[in-house]
Each structure stands twice: as C-alpha cells, then as structure tokens.
Amino acid sequence: MSVVDEATGGPADPRIPELAHRSFQALGTTVGISAPLEPDELDAAVETVQRIFLDAQTSFGVDGQGPVESLRRGDIELRYAHRRLRALYEQATVWRQATDGAYTPHTSTGPVDLSGLVKGWAIAHAGQAMMDLQLPHWSVTAGGDVLCSGSPFPAEPTGTDPFYGRHWRAGITDPFDPATLVADVPLAGTPGFTAALATTSTGAGSGPNAYLQVSVLAEEIVTADVLSQAIMAGGESTLEAAVRDFGVAVLVCGHDGELLASSTWPLQQSA
Amino acid sequence: MNIRQAIFASVASAGVLAAGWVGSTPPVAQATPAPAPYRLGSTTSGSAVAITTRPAASPSTLSSVRRQQLRGSEPVQLISTPDHMAPAGLAGPRA
C-alpha cells in the first residue's frame, strides 16, 4: 500500500516518520505531544517533557495544592518562597505593568496568585526542551494552550519555500458547544521558531467578564496565555492595546454569541 | 546525515528564519512565499521576541465575523479548549 503525502497529495517521503501523538496528565490537565518522529524518538522527547511538567508541579503545585496555593492563602510570604516562585512573581509583575493592570498576580482580595502563569511556564519550557533536543517539528498542547514549531508533515525544502511542508492547524472549541470547533487557524513555523495559541473561557463561578471566550495568537505561549487572561478581564481596551503593543491576533466570543476578531486574525479567504 | 540534520543544514544554508502564525493563505500553496504576512518568532521560551522584520502593528479594528470566515477545510491536528469545558475525547492532539 502506498502512502500519500497529505501536504502535496503525492507519494509521502518514506524517510520522514508519520505524525505520532502521546499524552499524559499533569498540572490538572491533559498534556499532548505530537511530532513526526519514530516512536522511540517521540517517547524519549515525551519523557523529557514529562519531567518538566513534574518539576512545575513540584515547584508550583497543582489543583489547589502546593506552593502557589500556599502563597494565595497567605500561608507563606513571597519573600520566604522558593526563588522560582519569586522569579515567576517578577515575571507576573512585568505583565501587570504591560497590560495596565488587566493581568495581575494577585487575587481580588490581595494575596499573590500565580496560578495563571504556571501552565504557560511549563509549556514554554517544554518547547525549549524540544528545541534543545534538536527536534524541528513538534507541538505541545495543554488545555487551551497550543505551542508548535515546524510542520506536522514536513517535507524537504524546495527553492525558497521556508516552511518545509504543510503548517500545523489548530482548532478552537465553540464555547456554546465544546464538541465542535468555532474556528481553526494555521500555525506555521519554520523549524526552530514557535507559534502559539491560547484560549481562555469564562469559568464556572467566575465574576463578570467582557467576553465569554478569548483566543490569542502570538509567537510564544506565555504572551498568548497572559494576554488572553488580560483581555478576558480588561475587555476591549486591553484587546486593542494587546494587538497594538504585542502584535498578536485576537478572536473573542461575546456572551450573546457574537464573534469579534481583530483585523490581524487570519480569516478564510474563500468566505 | 539523517533527514533532521539535512533539514537543519538547509535552514542554516538558506538563512531562512521566518515563522509564526500566518494569514489565510497557506504558505505551501505559494510558489514564492511572500514575506509580508509571515511573522518572525522566538527561539527562546517566555523571553523577549527576536524580531528582525516584524511589520508595523496596525491599530486593531475589532469587527464582527461570520463563522464561515473562521473555519477552513483543512484537517485540524491540534485543539485549543479551556480546561473547564473540555469534553472527553476532545482535549489534546488530533490525528
């Protein structure tokens, strides 16, 4: 049986492994790793990524337990916390300043809350680990966050084409029907460079927000993740500032179901 | 030299470093990639972005869009779904 290349429709390059997937549970969510790699290569890479997420769980905690939760409850003071927590807090305060306070590392009652940064931190480090392993084509997903590089179906470069095959394509779930997608976007990356998508939704029990769901496209995951949370909290003025200052693209779904996109969001040409 | 090394060698020799999410035109559909829509990305995690040819960001005009404008016909490999609303079988990567 001949194998057909999904990117070109022609015969697949037998030297390039098929896209393979692995997943595991960490930080209270499902982490997915996909890459066109041989099974043993992918398993080795996943082992490394698992260690990073385990390290994040140990350093920061998960599901209302651990150092981040202790900080939030006020059980420990930041100045006595582990240097990693303090470094994460410093990163969070930079984002607070960059978003004019729309993103904040504090709860509404005052204590430090770094839970919004932990997953992005882990995904970013997982992506860096994949690069350190010299893997050019991969994706890491965890909940609403997607980070990828290269192509799911890489091809030998031809001429001036810098993309080496078809881009990744990521779908965004419909906030009114999680079984369907409301949008999908190309995430194209030359090997070694990243593209990121983060989606934040109004959670059960959360306070009033301008939007029901916010998706942000950026070049790296912490930016996408933080800005999606900031826009959810800050509304349109934060959205405009995010697009202007960070060059991201944003898609939001209002509580009435209306879909609003920044002018930078990639729309389908045929529509 | 295996395929991965070959690809890296090609990247290095071509000096091509464009990346990032792209617009509605799939890059592989173009005979010659147009540089303007493509965004440069970051090689480091969570740090400053190394931009060399980032186009000037234009002020956003938030506009209403139809669902048909947001969905393509290509298969999806990845899913972005907020944690609290992920149904069984939808979280994580798609084949």
Image (spheres, helix red, strand yellow):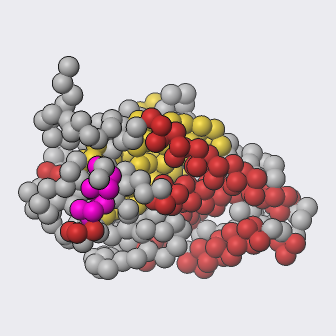
Q: Is residue B87 left or right of residue A271?
A: right
Residue A218 belongs to the span the image colors magenta: no
Magenta region: which residues?
B3-11
* Quadrant of res A262: bottom left
- Residue A57 appears in the rendering: yes
* Quadrant of res A60: bottom right
- Residue B78 appears in the rendering: no
Q: Is residue A57 left or right of residue B95?
A: right
Q: Is residue B45 above or below residue B2?
A: below
Q: Is residue A149 above or below residue A103?
A: above
A255 or A5: which is nearer to us?
A5
Query: Could you tell me which residue is drawn at 71 percent across and 62 percent down?
Result: A114
A136 or A124: which is nearer to us?
A136
Q: Residue furthest right?
A: A75
Quarter that holds the N terminus of chain A: top left
Query: Could you tell me which residue is drawn at 64 percent across and 73 percent down?
Result: A91
Task: Please state the horizontal and vertical placement of residue A51, each as a whole percent of the image.
Answer: 65, 49
A138 or A201: which is nearer to us?
A138
Q: Residue furthest left?
A: B31
Residue B7 belongs to the span the image colors magenta: yes
Task: Please state the horizontal and vertical placement of residue A178, each as a whole percent of the image.
Answer: 49, 34
Query: Could you tell me which residue is drawn at 27 percent across and 68 percent down?
Result: B12
Q: Is residue A1 above or below residue A53?
A: above
What kind of secondary structure does the magenta stretch mostly adopt? helix
Q: Is residue A120 left or right of residue A163?
A: right
Task: Please state the horizontal and vertical placement of residue A144, each as a whole percent of the image.
Answer: 52, 47
Query: Could you tell me which residue is drawn at 40 percent across and 76 percent down?
Result: B50
